């Protein structure tokens, strides 16, 4: 059986000629606590304002990874220092109503040739492997080949049969994209990195 006993060794003994340390007063402890709380609050505000922002998913166009009412963090800073990549899940202002925000996956980059043949996406003359789209979420819509304009991105939802995306409203201008989906934090069963 393992037990513990209180440590009865005396605390540090001041050297000769030095005064003993006084215990912290209650007002000092409250002051330290308030200081730490203020620093944590300022750090949180800076992170949310400049780096990460919590958002809530509305709708099911990104099933199976993102469900309606999932809460996640988006990184608002990443695209200031790195390029948007094919496959990124991004948040952008809806081109037809900038008051609304959409979350979709980047399928094609500026200059890419894209066409859709009965639900199969062809990119630059080759079929695109889309493991993030389960068979039950595919559709049979087609779209003639187009070249994605400069500074624009072709977006699609992972739940193809119900997604309103670039097949309807066209490529999304870079200026409308303001964050990359990074991490689902609620509900706990969905928590994890967004891929």
Image: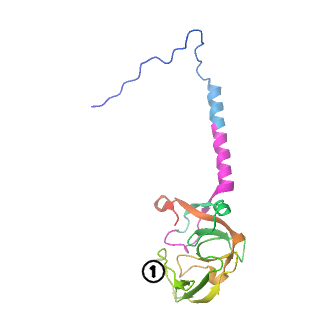
Residue visible at 66% across and 45% down in the picture: 41
Residue visible at 62% across and 76% down in the picture: 109
Q: Which of 154 and 104 is in front in this view?
A: 154
Residues drawn in magenta: 36-65
**22 above or below 115?**
above
Q: Which of 80 and 167 is in front in this view?
A: 80
Magenta residue check for 103: no
Magenta residue check for 54: yes
Q: Is residue 143 left or right of residue 50?
A: left
Residue visible at 56% across and 9% down in the picture: 16
Measuring from the top left, give residue 43's x and y in whole percent.
65, 46
Residue visible at 58% across and 14% down in the picture: 20
**To which quarter of the image does residue 115 belong?**
bottom right
**32 above or below 187?**
above
Q: Nearer the viewer, residue 72 or 175?
A: 175
Helix, strand or loop at label 1? It is helix
Residue pushed farthest top?
A: 17
What's the coloring here? rainbow
Residue pushed farthest left?
A: 1
Q: Which of 129 and 132 is in front in this view?
A: 129
Label 1, on which residue?
136
**Picture quarter with the N terminus:** top left
Q: In this view, does 19 lie to the left or right of 195?
A: right
Measuring from the top left, give residue 34's x and y in whole percent.
65, 36
Report the number of discs: 1
Measuring from the top left, give residue 136's x and y in whole percent.
45, 80
Q: How crowded is mark 1: few (under 14 residues within 10 Å), some or many (20 or more)?
A: few
């Amino acid at each position: 059986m393992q037990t513990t006993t209180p440590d009865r060794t005396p605390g540090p003994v001041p050297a000769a000629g030095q005064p003993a340390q006084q215990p912290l007063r209650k007002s000092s402890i409250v002051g330290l606590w308030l200081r730490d709380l203020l620093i944590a609050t300022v750090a949180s505000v800076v992170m949310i304002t400049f780096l990460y922002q919590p958002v809530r998913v509305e709708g099911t166009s990104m099933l199976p990874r993102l469900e309606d009412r999932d809460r996640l963090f988006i990184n608002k800073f990443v695209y200031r220092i790195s390029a948007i990549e094919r496959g990124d899940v991004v948040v952008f202002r809806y081109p037809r109503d900038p008051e609304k925000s959409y979350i979709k996956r980047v399928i094609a980059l500026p200059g890419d040739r894209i066409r859709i043949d009965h639900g199969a996406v062809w990119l630059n003359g080759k079929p695109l492997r889309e493991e993030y789209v389960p068979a039950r979420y595919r559709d049979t819509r087609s779209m003639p080949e187009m070249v994605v304009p400069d500074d624009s991105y072709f977006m699609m939802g992972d739940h193809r049969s119900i997604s309103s995306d670039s097949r309807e409203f066209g490529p999304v201008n870079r200026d409308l994209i303001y964050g990359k989906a990074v991490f689902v934090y609620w509900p706990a069963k969905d928590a994890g990195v967004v891929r």
